[in-house]
Image (cartoon, rainbow, N blue to C red):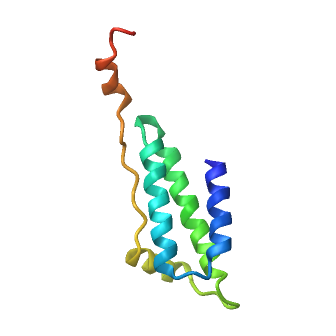
Amino acid sequence: MRAKLRQTKKWLKENRTESAEFIMDRIRRSLIGYYNYYCITDNSPTVDLFRDNIRTLLFKWLNRRSQKKSFTWEKFVLFLKKFPLPRPTVKVNIYQLRDHISYIL
């Protein structure tokens, strides 16, 4: 998780001058890929924490686009309503997989 957060931070720092639509599309696709890989039954709290950290990074780096603060937290919440971040959903329930591989257990 830390490596992906560092990678996202670096990307946001380098591309903060791009349009908001471009940045949010890239972050949305990155989050969906992360969710598809890591959203299993008991990993939901960690994936939620990852999403919160991404939101914090977005707030920080979108605020550094000009010399004055672009967003207050209230404005940022409105921005996220226009460009919502996807919510994590469990993709694989490991307890249901147990029925299919019972011969191994």
* Residue 12, percent from left and from top: 62, 70
The front one of 26 and 88 is 26
* Residue 86, percent from left and from top: 40, 61
Q: Is residue 77 above or below residue 96?
A: below
* Residue 9, percent from left and from top: 65, 64
Relative horizontal placement of residue 48, taking residue 10 as reference (left or right): left
Give the number of callouts: 0
The front one of 22 and 71 is 22
Task: Please name the residue shown 58% across and 59% down the image.
Answer: 53
Task: Please name the residue shown 40% across and 36% down the image.
Answer: 41
Relative horizontal placement of residue 25, taking residue 64 as reference (left or right): left
Q: Is residue 4 above or below residue 18?
A: above
Q: Quadrant of residue 10?
A: bottom right
Task: Please name the residue shown 49% across and 76% down the image.
Answer: 22
The front one of 48 and 38 is 38
Q: Quadrant of the C terminus?
A: top left
Task: Please name the residue shown 59% across and 66% down the image.
Answer: 56
The front one of 66 and 10 is 10
* Residue 5, percent from left and from top: 63, 56
